[in-house]
Image: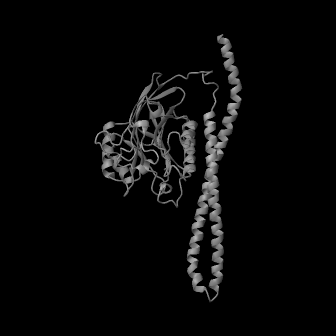
Amino acid sequence: MKLNFSLRLRVFNLNCWDIPYLSKHRADRMKRLGDFLNLENFDLALLEEVWSEQDFQYLRQRLSLTYPDAHYFRSGMIGSGLCVFSKHPIQEIFQHVYSLNGYPYMFHHGDWFCGKAVGLLVLHLSGLVLNAYVTHLHAEYSRQKDIYFAHRVAQAWELAQFIHHTSKNADVVLLCGDLNMHPKDLGCCLLKEWTGLHDAFVEAEDFKGSDDGCTMVPKNCYVSQQDLGPFPSGIRIDYVLYKAVSGFHICCETLKATTGCDPHSGKPFSDHEALMATLYVKHSPPQEDPCPAHGPPEKSDLISVLREARTELGLGIAKARWWAAFSGYVIIWGLSLLVLLCVLAAGEEAREVAIILCTPSVGLVLVAGAVYLFHKQETKGLCQAQAEMLHVLTRETETQDRGSEPHLAHCLQQEEDRA
């Protein structure tokens, strides 16, 4: 690779709201989206909530000349809804399904059946290795009573860990998707602190879009006030995040977001707004600053976020254990009732009543058993995430403690040399 190497990467991200039988004007929106992507000729288009594989195949055929490589990530009963279209050959593809993803008995929300996941694709661009990730985390259905908060924090940690462990050979890392988290939410801070990813909206040299970069806005005809909750002016839950390793520099030259309609027809692509980023990557020799103005190389923000995340997961673990214990008591009660009914059925007087009551009793035991097994699994998933955080927290705390004194001495020596 040449020392003066540089490239521009144009990226498109959209939560498409493509739910069969439920989403409005799906066919028209998919057609307009295909036309727009062909016209704009992005390097990468990363999409979420494409829950119709038929619609993916339609887009794939429509975009085949502009984006010759594409992939649909399959998981769960319904599907992850994730897909990518690339102008460049995709070298590698991998998918990781989140271990925690809501509750199966909350069927009206549907997240558990979707198999929310993160998809990875590896591209080689003129010798540069790009790891691009696309994801969709669990939805937040109530800001005030968020029963999925611990799951979303665990998903954010699992996503951060996945990126951390799969991007070691990458020169540039890119993450796009619907995180279902506000910029200052715990999960979002945890993700950015552990991975070192930069927010394109914060870093962009030129931004065009809604105020505060909102990606769900009241101007959009598919968005209701109920969707926005206590944020009537809009919310920002869709992101373009990126970073480069040592030896490369990356910046976001422009970031554009639709504002309730697509730039050409005036109609929305989705209930979410599309993000279009232009990233500039170039060679940059590592610059050493042994005594930065902000003091020793501490990771106090990461440590603080990890502690808060462990506390929240602890609350989730306590809740999961309570439900497991409750369903365990129901199982014992149901089995005791079944034994009693069997005894009654052996007699003559209450045989008919006992037989009639056996069926709902068996059903009760089976349902309680399923709930017990699920919450035991949930407990183990939350405990694992908490244990991983504790390991990182311990390591980072020890590193910070060891590094503070030598760093201070080094800075004092430099001051003496300058004097």
In the depicted view, which residue is nearer to us: 61 or 270? 270
Horizontal and vertical percent for residue 67? 36, 40
Does residue 369 show up? Answer: yes
- Looking at the image, is 170 positioned above or below residue 385? above
- In the current view of this chain or complex, which residue is farthest to the bottom? 348
Horizontal and vertical percent for residue 59? 34, 47
Q: Is residue 243 left or right of residue 15?
A: right
- Looking at the image, is 114 positioned above or below residue 246? below
Horizontal and vertical percent for residue 382? 61, 51
Does residue 172 show up? Answer: no
In the depicted view, which residue is nearer to us: 349 or 27? 349
- Looking at the image, is 339 positioned above or below residue 255? below
Number of numbered markers: 0
Q: Is residue 128 left or right of residue 412?
A: left
Q: Residue at x 57, y 36 (%)?
A: 193
Colour scheme in use: one colour
The image quarter containing residue 290 is top right
- In the current view of this chain or complex, which residue is farthest to the top? 419
In the depicted view, which residue is nearer to us: 293 or 194? 293
- In the current view of this chain or complex, which residue is farthest to the left? 265
Q: Which quadrant of the figure contains the C terminus? A: top right
Horizontal and vertical percent for residue 209? 38, 36
